[in-house]
Image (cartoon, rainbow, N blue to C red):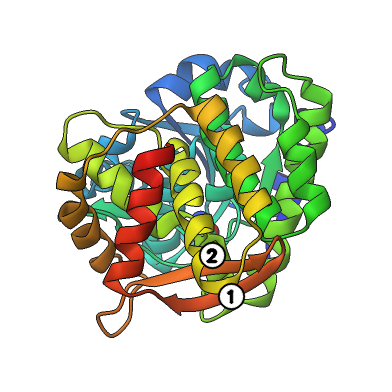
Amino acid sequence: MQDIILCQSLEENLTQAVSSCPHDRLFVLTDTETFRHCWPLVAGIPCVRDAQMITIPATDEHKTLETLSTVWTALQQGGASRHSLMVNLGGGMVTDLGGFAASTFKRGMAYINIPTTLLSMVDASVGGKTGINFGGLKNEIGVFNCARSVLLDTTFLRTLDHQNLLSGYAEMIKHALISSTEDWAELMRFDLDQVDYALLQQLVAKSVAIKERIVTEDPTEKGIRKALNLGHTAGHALESLALAQGRPVLHGYAVAWGLVCELYLSFLRTGFPQRTLQQTLQFVRGHYGSFPITCKHYDQLYEYMTHDKKNQGGVVNFTLLANVGDIRINQSASKEEIMEMLDFFRENC
Ligand code: GLY
């Protein structure tokens, strides 16, 4: 399992993490943005002085086989072996693609993640899901293989824009919803307009601990790890619709709206409390705004949901809640129930 380290000093923590992975050569992967904004905070640390840099284009549209191929080529030309070590410095795209490149090069070399966005700190970099997009589908090709260490340094968040902060925060809300009423209430109270970074650091630590607990129990998503899909069946459909309409949204925004949809479905199917649904709805609408849809979009959204890779046997599969922290995985819903969920979303979000 991976070591998740809440950094007090990135220099000390990275030095320790690198020295606990004996290696012949060291590589650092960044994208063009993290090379500019985040690498300067790492470059002076002696343990990475001799690292070979690999820089790839930023953003999810480059999470492709072509980019992966450039990373493999750079590793090959740089003399990497199975005993080399890669440090991925970036958001989810860098940690997913870099983790996959490292996991497959010469059948696998070790890697360390230094996530630089809130989304990658609380979700992407933890739990060993690696991969690339392929054939128009997100994360279609990949393997489960954990980073040796994940270094969480919330200093990086101070330069993150508000939208990307909100995007990561949606995954924290998801973790709180599958955890406890106290965790959920704490996130609903947090002031996202005047961010208290010291408090955010504590909330990040709690959020990652929730994910870590679940992933340790079920690393390859045979059972309880499906809880982490809460909000994502509807969320991915909204994200795909947004992309198809040429108005792409950040992943976490789609997850926030997806949570509203699936909490409503939880209310219908598993008795989730209406008051908690309404409070979450208000929070989401207040911070993430609305995502206007009409009845004309329903068939397309339903189609996206039926193609979700988490489905089995042709039925749309959801993770629902009977209450905060009371998880029900493997819940199918009828087309009528899904349409009712979309009605609720259209009228309220
Ligand atoms: N992002 C959900 C998971 O890691 O399982």
Residue shown at 51% from the left, 50% from the top: 259
Residue 338, placed above or below residue 209: below
Q: Nearer the viewer, mark 1 or mark 2?
A: 2
Query: Does the CB distance between marks 1 and 2 fall below 8 Å?
Result: yes
* Residue 223 vs residue 37, the one in the foreground: 223
Q: Locate residue 28, reporting x and y percent.
A: 50, 36
Q: Residues within 10 Å of mark 2 (few under 14, many from 20)?
A: many
Residue shown at 73% from the left, 65% from the top: 213
Report whether the residue tagged 2 is closer than 8 Å to ligand 1.
Answer: no
The quarter of the rendered structure image containing the N terminus is bottom right
- Give the numbered dot on residue 328: 1
Left or right, 224 with reference to 143: right
Secondary structure at numbered mark 1: strand
Q: Label 2 amino acid?
A: Ser
Q: Locate residue 290, reporting x and y percent.
A: 40, 30
Q: Quadrant of residue 39?
A: top right
Q: Find disc 2 in the rendering and name its residue.
A: 266
Q: Quadrant of residue 58?
A: top left
Q: Locate residue 328, reporting x and y percent.
A: 58, 75
Left or right, 105 with reference to 269: left
Q: CA distance from mark 1 to mark 2?
A: 9 Å
Q: Locate residue 288, reporting x and y percent.
A: 49, 29
Residue shown at 31% from the left, 28% from the top: 57
Left or right, 91 with reference to 17: left
> Looking at the image, is mark 1 or mark 2 earlier in the sequence?
2
Q: Label 1 amino acid?
A: Arg
- Give the numbered dot on residue 30: none
* Residue 84 vs residue 146, the one in the foreground: 146
Secondary structure at numbered mark 2: helix
